[in-house]
Amino acid sequence: MTPIISTSVLDADNAARRDALGRDYESLGERLSRRGIDIDAVKNKVAAYGVAVPSWGVGSGGTRFARFPGAGEPRNIFDKLEDCAVIHQLTRATPAVSLHIPWDKVSDLKELKEKGTALGLTFDAMNSNTFSDAPGQAHSYKFGSLSHTDAATRRQAIEHNLECIEIGTALGSRALTVWIGDGSNFPGQSHFTRTFERYLDSMKAVYAGLPNDWRVFTEHKMFEPAFYSTVVQDWGTNYLIARELGPKAFCLVDLGHHAPNVNIEMIVARLIQFKKLGGFHFNDSKYGDDDLDTGSIDPYRLFLVFNELVDAEARAADGFDPAHMLDQSHNVTDPIESLMTSAMEVGRAYAQALIVDRSALAGFQEDNDALMASETLKAAFRTDVEPILSMARLENGGAIAPVAAYRASGYRARVAAERPAVAGGGGGIV
Ligand code: LRH
Ligand code: MN
Ligand code: MN
């Protein structure tokens, strides 16, 4: 396949940076070796790491107030895949795409799968959508979907999820992510227990349609679009769902779906301990489900989440195999640049977590040496691991500096000339 970004542009940008990177890598390697860490071993793990890109992330997002489209917005799923391929070509960190149905209009699945293969991309978890009405659907989700009071509406939502599994199977996906907006705006509007019973019954029907090698991830979220109560509102409810459904059901943690200040890394640890951590939607937030770029607000929290993941990986925790996906919305940046930066932030958190001195940490924990335990984590977090990430990218055929190489390539201007401008306007989240 001809790479989308020309190799001459990429090589020229890398050539200008290669010597400095070599020196930075060597110097960091020396400093890490004094701490007993082999830099190449860390780099190899980072090089093998990947996070899936959300198909809905490559177009400009929007708020419920307005959407301001950028130039060269993808027109269809094929354009989206090309944008995703650019992200992967330059970062070498995003080998898979997570689709959202029916936002992604898919018809010829064979052609879609072939396009993915040609671009070097695979298909990660499928995301269903029963939180908005699709044109022409028989029953509205205004008052809920999988937990709706009306059986025919629930059945329609179940069928949609089964269809997502069918589409995903044809594309080689092996997981379904279910997030519903069901909930209420007024005390008394819905009966908490009966609503949750209906949800569980519906999810059991979806679960029954999972192929043997598939997993289902249920995603909790504290509020929005429902503002008084939400059916799958927190990790406790999510854990109950995964337990009720069975061994193929796991909890998905979207970093933006918790109240401010909630200790997400501890939730992650609990779900790992009880073998129900299914995966992540990475993003960042300050106030709520802001869907800001991963690592842009609180990189320390992202590192602390990865600290739990690496801890589990290091002790080969039973049943530990979480899926990693980005889920964010870009309103003021070029989505490709945001997604590349975010994928690199995830890689950075992983690298920092890999260099935590775990035996020292365990000792400080045993001795109740709070200060030194915290300093052990901070020592890893404060280390600038950029040379490791850059070297991993370079050796994998990517860019030392993906954003610079992307800008030098003129890709956005090129697709803007091919893809007609779309009108902005009122609200909407995609
Ligand atoms: C809900 C959510 C969920 C959706 C996505 C678009 O807030 O995080 O994952 O599928 O946003
Ligand atoms: Mn999400
Ligand atoms: Mn969200």
Image (cartoon, grey):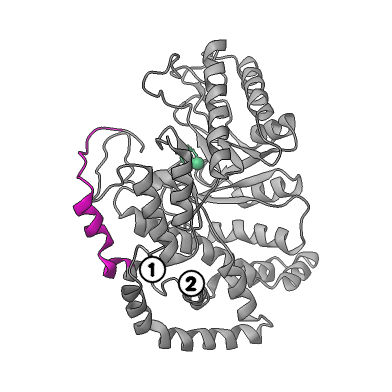
Residue 202 in the image, given as x and y percentages of width and height: 62, 21
Q: Which amino acid does label 1 sit on?
A: Pro
The residue that appears at 64% across and 40% down in the rendered structure is 251
Q: Is mark 1 on a helix, strand or loop?
A: helix
Residue 9 in the image, given as x and y percentages of width and height: 31, 74
Quadrant where the N terminus sits is bottom left
The residue that appears at 47% across and 60% down in the rendered structure is 343
Q: Residue 402 carries which label?
A: 1
| Image vertical order of residue 107 relative to residue 357, above or below | above
Q: In this view, does 118 lie to the left or right of 357?
A: left
Q: Which mark is residue 393?
A: 2
Q: What stretch is highlighted in magenta?
A: 406-427
Q: Which amino acid does label 2 sit on?
A: Arg
* Residue farthest along the right direction in this orientation: 366
For label 2, count other residues whose C-alpha is less than 10 Å away and answer few (under 14), some (14-19) or many (20+): many
Residue 102 in the image, given as x and y percentages of width and height: 43, 32
Q: What element carries label 2?
A: helix
For label 1, count other residues whose C-alpha is less than 10 Å away and answer few (under 14), some (14-19) or many (20+): many
The residue that appears at 68% across and 71% down in the rendered structure is 372
Q: Are marks 2 and 1 in contact (CB under 8 Å)?
A: yes
Q: Is residue 68 left or right of residue 192?
A: left
Quadrant where the C terminus sits is top left
C-alpha separation, residue under disc 2 versus residue under disc 1: 9 Å
Do we see residue 280 in this rendering? yes
Do we see residue 284 in this rendering? no
Residue 415 in the image, given as x and y percentages of width and height: 25, 54
| Image vertical order of residue 301 relative to residue 420, above or below | below
| Mark closer to the chain start, 2 or 1 | 2
Q: Is mark 2 within 8 Å of ligand 2?
A: no
For this rendering, which residue is in front, 178 or 294?
A: 178
| Image vertical order of residue 85 relative to residue 25, above or below | above
